[in-house]
Image (tube, rainbow, N blue to C red):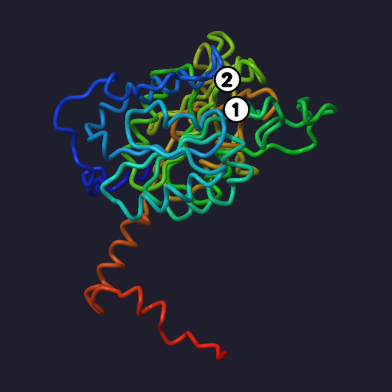
């Protein structure tokens, strides 16, 4: 296995809180307005409960959202925040994170907001490796606009905008993120508070962009979309819990595992026996190659959600965009002195048009 080398944490640049904080300190005075029973409540509670662990000053934490049900999130966090433009949260957050390295910047978005109109902004934030933490709420439907199919809705999905069934092949957000060279990619579930908090903790510690897909139930327009992953009995056979350094095993009797097909190199699920136990993969989230992480992301059946991996699929190190930009600016100042905007605007590439 490849181990991540130690590096000074970028969180050290963010001022620490002067006193110990609690969940209450991160609750705003705004009335929470989501539909009763919405999975967003569980995610909000988990984030509010987790934030004190960071020990950061609230004034130096920012939540940026786009448009959608999830995008009301900044109103309910007692931090700075911005309810921005549809799909543009990663772009706005990039500007903030690169210009203010003393901030901890989080993006809250949905499957429609991030993967439809915002798809371009999302992939570029991921490939640049900006120091952002992106929480992608995936309920596989458009909730705010009342139940149209989204970029993650399964093929054949019947909705108000697809009365005869969707013809679109759905995005797999995890595959998309890995393909865009994301350095941290994880998946968790809204109702699993312990797992969700653990993934958030690892995302917060990561240097660079961390994308966390959160399966979130919309009980009004797509209720029960993830029931198979939440029901105790079904989940044992459907959910593959990934832990770095441990064999990828699951099942009610821990009798199933993920192995590589020696002929094709693809990953598949096997019934474990004494003869084939050695074939079970050891999960290595830190390996430089994205190949296995991508293959893991493709295990889940998009219709039934059988064999869905949750946890951190990939967590690797490479230069962070914010740091590289700061170093470049420092070098420019050392070599040329501070810039002059007026001189730049009226430089050699200008001309005067005669009357």
Which callout, 2 or 1, points to the residue nearer the camera? 2
Tell me the quadrant of the picture where the C terminus can be found. bottom right
Query: Residue 181, relative to residue 54: is it above or below?
Result: below
Q: Report the front residue among 274 and 150.
A: 150
Q: Position of residue 327 (x, y in %)?
A: 28, 64
Seen from this angle, which residue lies furthest right? 164
SS assignment at label 2: loop
Extreme top residue here?
A: 233
User: For mark 2, what is the residue?
Assistant: 217
- Which numbered disc flags the more N-terminal residue, 2 or 1? 2
Q: Position of residue 262 (x, y in %)?
A: 60, 41
Can residue 86 be seen in the rendering of this structure?
A: yes
Could you classify mark 1 by the number of other residues whose Cα lies within 10 Å: few (under 14), some (14-19), or many (20 or more)?
Answer: some
Secondary structure of residue under mark 1: strand
Q: Position of residue 218 (x, y in %)?
A: 60, 20
Question: Looking at the figure, which quarter contains the N terminus?
Answer: top left
Residue beneath label 1, please? 269
Q: Is residue 234 left or right of residue 322?
A: right
Q: Which sits in the foreground, 182 or 161?
A: 161
Q: Residue furthest left?
A: 18
Residue in the picture at 59% in, 25% down: 307
Separation of marks 2 and 1 at Cα, in angstroms:
27 Å
Please state if 18 lies on the left or on the right of 53 as rendered: left
Where 214 sits versus 250, above or below?
below
Horizontally, residue 212 falls left or right of residue 105, namely right
Residue at position x 56%, y 44% from top? 87
Give residue 76's quadrant in the image.
top left
Residue 308 image offset from top left, x and y in percent: 57, 26
The answer to which of 190 and 33 lies nearer the viewer is: 33
Q: Quadrant of residue 46?
A: top left
- Which sits in the foreground, 282 or 288? 288
């Amino acid at each position: 296995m490849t181990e991540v080398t130690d590096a000074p944490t970028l969180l050290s640049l963010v001022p620490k809180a002067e006193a110990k904080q609690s969940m209450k300190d991160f609750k705003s005075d705004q009335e929470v307005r989501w539909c009763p029973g919405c999975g967003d409540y569980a995610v909000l509670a988990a984030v509010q409960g987790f934030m004190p662990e960071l020990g950061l000053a609230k004034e130096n934490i920012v939540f940026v959202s786009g448009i959608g049900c999830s995008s009301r999130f900044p109103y309910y966090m007692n931090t700075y925040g911005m309810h921005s433009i549809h799909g543009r949260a990663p772009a706005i957050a990039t500007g903030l994170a690169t210009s203010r390295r003393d901030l901890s910047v989080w993006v809250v978005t949905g499957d429609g907001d991030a993967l439809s109109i915002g798809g371009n902004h999302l992939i570029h934030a991921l490939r640049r490796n900006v120091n952002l933490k992106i929480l992608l709420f995936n309920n596989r439907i458009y909730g705010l606009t009342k139940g149209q199919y989204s970029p993650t809705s399964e093929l054949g999905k019947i909705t108000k905008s697809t009365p005869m069934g969707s013809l679109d092949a759905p995005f797999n957000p995890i595959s998309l993120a890995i393909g865009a060279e994301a350095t941290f990619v994880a998946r968790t579930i809204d109702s699993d508070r312990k797992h969700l908090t653990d993934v958030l903790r690892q995302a917060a510690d990561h240097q660079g962009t961390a994308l966390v897909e959160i399966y979130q139930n919309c009980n009004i327009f797509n209720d029960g979309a993830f029931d198979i992953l939440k029901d105790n009995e079904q989940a044992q056979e459907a959910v593959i819990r990934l832990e770095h350094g441990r064999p990828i095993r699951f099942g009610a009797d821990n009798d199933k595992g993920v192995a590589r097909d020696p002929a094709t190199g693809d990953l598949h699920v096997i019934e474990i026996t004494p003869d084939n136990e050695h074939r079970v993969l050891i999960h290595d989230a830190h390996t430089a190659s994205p190949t296995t992480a991508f293959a893991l992301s493709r295990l889940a059946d998009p219709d039934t959600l059988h064999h869905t991996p949750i946890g951190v699929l990939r967590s690797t190190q490479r230069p962070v965009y914010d740091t590289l930009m700061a170093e470049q600016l420092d070098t420019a100042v050392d070599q040329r002195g501070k810039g002059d905007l007026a001189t730049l605007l009226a430089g050699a590439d200008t001309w005067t048009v005669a009357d």
